[in-house]
Image: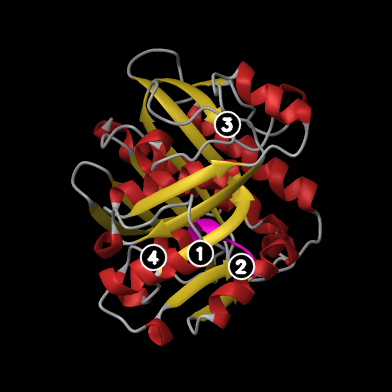
Amino acid sequence: MQNLTFDFLKVTEQAAIASYPWVGSGDKLKADGAATNAMRNTLNQIKFNGRIVIGEGELDDAPMLFIGEKVGTGLGTKVDIAVDPIEGTTSTVNGQDNAFTVIAAAPKGTLLHAPDMYMEKLVVGPKAKGEIDINVSLTENVHKVAKANGKNIKDVKVLIQKRERHNKGIEEIRNMGAKVHLFDEGDITYAIATCIEDQEIDLFYGIGGAPEGVVAAVAVKCLNGDMQARLLPQSRKEYDRCVEMGLDNPEIALRHSELIKSDKCIFTATGITENILLDGIKTDTESNYTTHSLILNGESKQLRYVKCKHPNPHVA
């Protein structure tokens, strides 16, 4: 797996560069299409036997990388892939912060194989590893995390996406005296940030996309944090689709080891616009692109930043 790290870095770099011309354009379809096509084309040049196990599309949702799609040359290591060609498409096309491209990879059979649907997520950093339980209340979880992190409740910082579906949870946390910090886009970023001490985030909670949840689970594993999740089927069709994909009880709590079963995992992300972890793409007077990326390694538990200058792809 580790010999594929810089190949996957190239995948996110190329997807970010392809999407960059659409920053501020207002055209989500073209931005997504550009990133997806670049990601697919770059993946298919890599010598490995890959399969998309969770992503933002099914077979009839082209141009998205669809669940079950084979990627790579078909030769070499068998790898499960979780992708989000653009995390923060709305941010991208509105010219706002918190947009990046991301890929997570692990040996075949070790990533959760699930449809693109809603997922409830709870994430903490290394100090609170083993203390969270998605089956109990947010209040109980906040108390456990506060104790693990050596903090008073009033000093606990919880990150939640600003969505109406989270209003009850926000009220519960604030009523107990903890601090809620809201964000608009990019829940993968804030899930990862729980595991980076200088970000001072104690807990991430939210209901969002399952693909983002699995991608985040890989990053959190690489940083020795902890995560639990639960799929939330919104219809009988979604429930049955989970069962078809091997999830006999789709609404059961998923421990971190069920989201990602191996330490031999890789996570790479490249900024499109700026976020709390990554710089956005920069251009110079000759229109060359400079990308800023994050690489995480599950075996070494290393966090590595990579800055790379790319020749302007639009100049022959």
Amino acid residing under circle 1:
Leu
- Labels 2 and 1 touching (C-beta < 8 A): yes
Amino acid residing under circle 4:
Thr
Q: Residue at x 29, y 62 (%)?
A: 128
Position of 27 relative to 198 (above/below):
above
Q: Nearer the viewer, mark 2 or mark 3?
A: 2
Instruction: Find disc 4 in the rendering and name its residue.
Output: 194
Q: Residue at x 54, y 75 (%)?
A: 173
Instruction: Find disc 2 in the rendering and name its residue.
Output: 169
Instruction: Find disc 1 in the rendering and name its residue.
Output: 138
Q: CA distance from mark 3 to mark 1?
A: 39 Å
Give the left or right position of residue 161, taking residue 304 as reference: right
Give the left or right position of residue 216, taking residue 244 as reference: left
Q: CA distance from mark 4 to mark 3?
A: 30 Å
Amino acid residing under circle 2:
Gly
Q: Quadrant of residue 258?
A: top left
Q: Quadrant of residue 187?
A: bottom right
- Labels 4 and 3 touching (C-beta < 8 A): no
Position of 64 relative to 148 (above/below):
above
Q: Which circle's residue, 2 or 3, is located before the other in the chain?
A: 3
Q: Which circle's residue, 4 or 3, is located before the other in the chain?
A: 3
Q: Which circle's residue, 2 or 1, is located before the other in the chain?
A: 1
Give the left or right position of residue 199, taking residue 130 as reference: right
Please say whether residue 291 is visible from this viewpoint.
no
Give the residues in magenta: 184-189
Mark 4 secondary-structure assignment: loop
Please say whether residue 230 is visible from this viewpoint.
yes
Position of 34 relative to 81 (above/below):
below
Amino acid residing under circle 3:
Arg
Instruction: Find disc 3 in the rendering and name its residue.
Output: 40
Q: Position of residue 246 (x, y in %)?
A: 54, 19
Pick whichever, 255 or 271, lies toward us: 255
